[in-house]
Image (cartoon, rainbow, N blue to C red):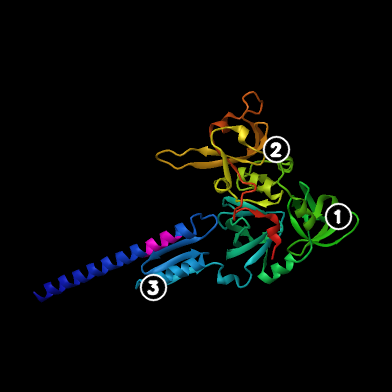
Amino acid sequence: MKNSALSLFLCFLFFSISCQSSKEKEIIESQISELKETLAPDKRVAIWDISYENGKLLGTTDQVEGYEQMLETIKEMGYQVDDEVVRLPSEELGDQIRALVTISVANIRSQPKHSAELATQALMGTPLKVLEKSDGWYRVQTPDQYISWVDASGIQLMTEEELESWYRTAKVVFTDFSGFVMDSNERVSDLVAGDIMELESESQEFFQVKLPDGRSGQIKKSEAMPWEQWIASRDTEPQSLISTAKTMMGAPYLWGGTSIKGVDCSGFTKTIFYLNGKIIPRDASQQVLEGEQVDVDKNWENLEVGDLLFFGKKATEDSKERVVHVGMWIGNNQFIHSRGRVRISSFDPESPLYDEYELNRYLRTKRILNTPSENILSVSSLLEL
């Protein structure tokens, strides 16, 4: 009889503990989920990879302040948890939590390996935030907030103080479509439009430049401009946007590409605006969230040069809208975009450039110029202290 009563008591105790543990898990997981929606709804620009298992909080986040507040809330609720979440930047980096791109175009991938999907690119001289390292790769965040992995050979790690010192040096920007840094008759590095280098000296025909990793050489003055002069000359007037876009005609489509070596659709629009002084969000699904909506009904007379046209699948009762493509309006019923290659398409059925495919999946047009947004920056902000 005593054994039977003891067994019943133990069963009840176990059930009570299980219910309590289940409730605790539900509450904590709810906290994690709610804060993810608030702090990191877009995993491309914020990290909130947190889980709760067996009384432990596990994972990684760069939203440190929000995470600390969540820990305090959990504690106030009376729950005791083991905190094993890694805060980024990782302590393993020490004070080298900044970097500069040292090659003409750095490929930044979704995972720390060369076989991973190309997520985006960054040009020489682009400052990066460094978050963590893994087997010769670094997780970095670009000025447009995109987070992915870059090979260590493509960047120069720096402290905040070292980067600030670099900001204060004179710079030049490469303006030709492509070219090289030369040392005597030897090639030091290739270059693409938008690459930023330190200016050491100049002669009548050449700039003596230093790359972020210390390599040095010469570039023709006819192929570059001093930073301040380049910034002052940037504008988003219609002809500037059209001229920049057309210089890339025929450039191959490259998933993840944001340089003249190859571009995807949103990488193309991003590059057009970058070379004219504006940093806009990376992906089409991010770009569509910016600016003023000017058309959804194919009233092309409402559009202006520089407006962004978005394409994809409309929302249905069972699925959300999917934005999968973007191009830039250039007037005369035409837009320029990267599909297969950089090309011009028309919505005029009588034109040889008529693009029925894109017409059929047209969603809307947004005007992002002259619309204040914390997600659209001046290129001059790249080198601001």
Asked whether residue 59 is in view, the answer is yes
Q: Which class describes the residues within 10 Å of circle 1: few (<14), some (14-19), or many (20+)?
A: few
Residue 146 in the image: above or below residue 360: below
Residue 79 in the image: above or below residue 364: below
Residue picked out by circle 1: 185
The amino acid marked with disc number 2 is: Gly
Residue in the picture at 43% in, 68% down: 70
Q: Look at the numbered disc 2 and give the secondary structure of its residue.
A: loop
In the picture, residue 380 is in which quadrant? Answer: bottom right
The amino acid marked with disc number 3 is: Lys
Q: Residue furthest top?
A: 350
The residue nearer to you, when weighing 94 against 378, is 378
Number of the front mark, 2 or 3:
3
Relative to 175, 147 lies left or right: left
Q: CA distance from mark 3 to mark 1?
A: 66 Å
Sequence-wise, the earlier of marks 2 and 3 is 3
- The location of residue 13, given as percent across then percent down, is 21, 71
The amino acid marked with disc number 1 is: Asn
In the picture, residue 296 is in which quadrant? Answer: top right
- The location of residue 67, given as percent across then percent down, is 47, 67
The residue nearer to you, when weighing 216 against 287, is 287
The segment highlighted magenta reads: 28-35
Sequence-wise, the earlier of marks 1 and 2 is 1
Asked whether residue 189 is in view, the answer is no
Residue picked out by circle 2: 250
Numbered badge on residue 75: 3
Q: Which class describes the residues within 10 Å of circle 3: few (<14), some (14-19), or many (20+)?
A: few
Q: Look at the numbered disc 1 and give the secondary structure of its residue.
A: loop
Residue 131 in the image: above or below residue 342: below
Q: What secondary structure predominates along the stretch shown in magenta?
A: helix
Number of the front mark, 1 or 2:
2
